[in-house]
Image (cartoon, helix red, strand yellow):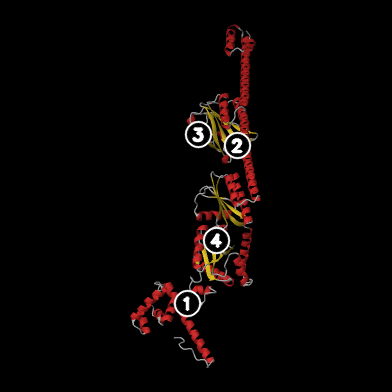
Amino acid sequence: MSVLELLAAGAPAARFEELLRPAREEASDDTLAELDRAVRLASRVQALIGHAQQREAGLAALVDTSHDLTLVHGMDALLHEIARRARRLLNFDMAYIGLRDADDEGRASSIRAAEGETTSLSVGLKTSEDSGLGSLVQRSGAPAWSPDYLADRDLPHSSDIDAVVRAEGLHAILAVPLGYGTTVFGTLYGADRKVRHFTPDEISLMRSLGKLAGVAIERARLLEDTRAEVTELELDTSRARSSLHAQRRVEAAYIRLIDLVLSGCDAQTLAEAAAKELSGALIVRDCIGRTVVVTGTPPDLAEEDVLRWTYDAHAASRPVPMPEGGWVAPVTAGGENLGVILLVPDAPLTDGFGVRLLQLTARSVALILLLQRTSTVAHDQIRDELLEELLSEIRPQPRQLVQRARRLGIAIDEPHVMVVARPEGGPAGRAAAWASSYAHRMSGLMKFRDGCVTLLVPGEDPSAVAAAVAAELTPLVGHPVTIGAAGPVSGPGRVAQAHREALSCLEALTELGNLGCVATPQQMGFLGVLLSETHGVGDYIESVIGPVLDYDAQRFTELTRTLDAYFASSSSPTRAASDLHVHPNTVSRRLERIAELLGADWQDAERALEIQLALRLHRTRRTLQHRHATAGAVRDPGNPAPQGAGS
């Protein structure tokens, strides 16, 4: 059989050697040379045919791979399938994939999938942009390889990568880029556990697989993004449908409530209908804290807690939750506080239906309360105007103001106390809402301006009224409250004056650094004489040593003179007795009587200073009165000088 016949039959190389063996013995040299040349050419043709078949098989494998990759869903499954295909395509011992980290601005990559690994070190390994074959691939966008990686000193090495390569027993490594278009976002690696020199065809085939894999990965990414967007759209659609359904329920329930209002129902009927819609116990309170309506069986709530939640709701102008699962909704009309709704639902409220319906229920209740309290609303406006006129310098006749106040249920001609309170922090809306409620409860007047609450309420003791205000307002705002109070005053003519005195006390406390304290002109002692427009020197003397002066006047004793001598002798009873020319026991008995009249603490430093000031003012007044009387006698000789003056 000739060489061509063997070649056409696809005979193995051994058959060609069998053809040459008899020819070497029988043929001539020329014939042998020609036959040998024909055999070599046939071997080359066979090699080319084998190479072509190998390329065809590789291309067929690539086509199959590209088809199979389109069937894989999910990024992790796709990466493992790519690594598996790379390992089988080029008969690698191990194949793995590294992708750039999105949260590291692409400066590092992580091994995301591996096939043929023998340790757990490879997956999750981070590779930096300046070490390993991956760094060369990422920078150049071209394949990089090494027949023996650990022994190749021309490559940038890192201890972490070398440790994994050593642990896996790898030698030859081939890396190709994974990308889409001009963007490279990862690396596909193939490795052998022996030294291997990669052929151009192997490198080209691996590069082609990398391109196919890059397209598949990008497609998977887009598909995942699309699925995420679709899922988000489905959630948005579901939320929109739920919201629309809730809005329709709210609208239908609100229409039913408004129909009840328009039909002329009372607050009780409306509250019962609202409680049925909201499924819970409902309480309606008016602006002064009185319970107007109760439906169901609400739990016992502390009044101070209810007040705090009420003021929070009015300050926020929306329903606010209570710690026990209930809700408080403000009932307002045009910014005016008409009351509050307390709801204790059987199940937690949802923002879409429950809270919104509660807010609309509060508006429906406001309509009823507004219709029922039209005259009261008008009275509130008149109350504000009345207080403004009382505090102004220009006002109508006092009799007119008294009559207007009585029509509002305020006896302005009876004793009242003026209080100016300034919270040193906390929500201003809460303080304003409290002041309105407190003024209604006390049948008084109020205004809130520049962070200060001004109250004119019935009372005769400004200290007691101020203490009551502080006891309610301080825990409510959660901060100290500085209060100045003055009075009592009766009639409209002295209200503005009392207001100025209360403001002066508040300013004095501020200047003295006593924030969070209460002060009245009477409490501030001699400083109160300077601040007060109504309490003069006589009032101050009376408040400090009045009992002693009255005792002397009624029993003709000398307790006042003994006090003078006692303080003049540096609080020495013996020296005072010498100056008075009496026995020391007499001074001791008089001092005991003084302690009974002024109190056991009359010798304390602060009280003693007040008493000495009062004694000096008393002596000065008597001296001036004596001089005035003497001067009058000189001008009118017909009138004798008063007897006993200055005694």
Name which of mark 1 and mark 4 comes first in the sequence. Answer: 4
Whether residue 433 sits left or right of residue 263 in the image: it is left
Q: Indicate the secondary structure of the residue bearing disc 3.
A: helix
Q: Amino acid at mark 1?
A: Ile
Residue of label 3: 162
Above or below 551: residue 476: above
On the question of residue 299 being in view, the answer is yes
Q: Position of residue 485 (x, y in %)?
A: 52, 68
**Which mark's residue is nearer the viewer, 1 or 2?**
1
Q: Secondary structure at mark 2?
A: helix
Residue plotted at (59% across, 9% down) = 19
Residue that sits furthest to the bottom in the current view: 637
Instruction: Name the residue that disc number 2 marks.
Output: 139
Q: Of the residues under marks 3 and 2, which one precedes in the sequence? A: 2
Q: Quadrant of residue 140?
A: top right
Q: Residues within 10 Å of mark 2 (few under 14, many from 20)?
A: few
Q: Earlier in the sequence, mark 1 or mark 2?
A: 2
The alpha-carbon separation of the residues under discs 1 and 3 comes to 99 Å
Q: Is residue 519 visible?
A: no
1 or 3: mark nearer the eye: 1
Three-letter code, disc 4: Arg
Which tag is nearer the camera, tag 4 or tag 2?
A: 4
User: Could you tell me how far apart the alpha carbons at marks 1 and 2 are, in whole angstroms?
Assistant: 98 Å
Q: Is label 1 or label 4 in front? A: 4
Q: How far apart in space, not on screen, are marks 4 and 2 (Cα)?
A: 81 Å
Kindly identify which numbered label has been placed on residue 441.
Answer: 4
Q: Which mark is residue 532?
A: none
Give the residue number, with chain letter if any, for mark 1.
Answer: 541
Q: Could you say where residue 165 lies in the image, as x and y percent from the top left?
A: 50, 31
* Nearest the eye: 333 or 201: 333
Please tell me which of labels 4 and 3 falls first in the chain.
3
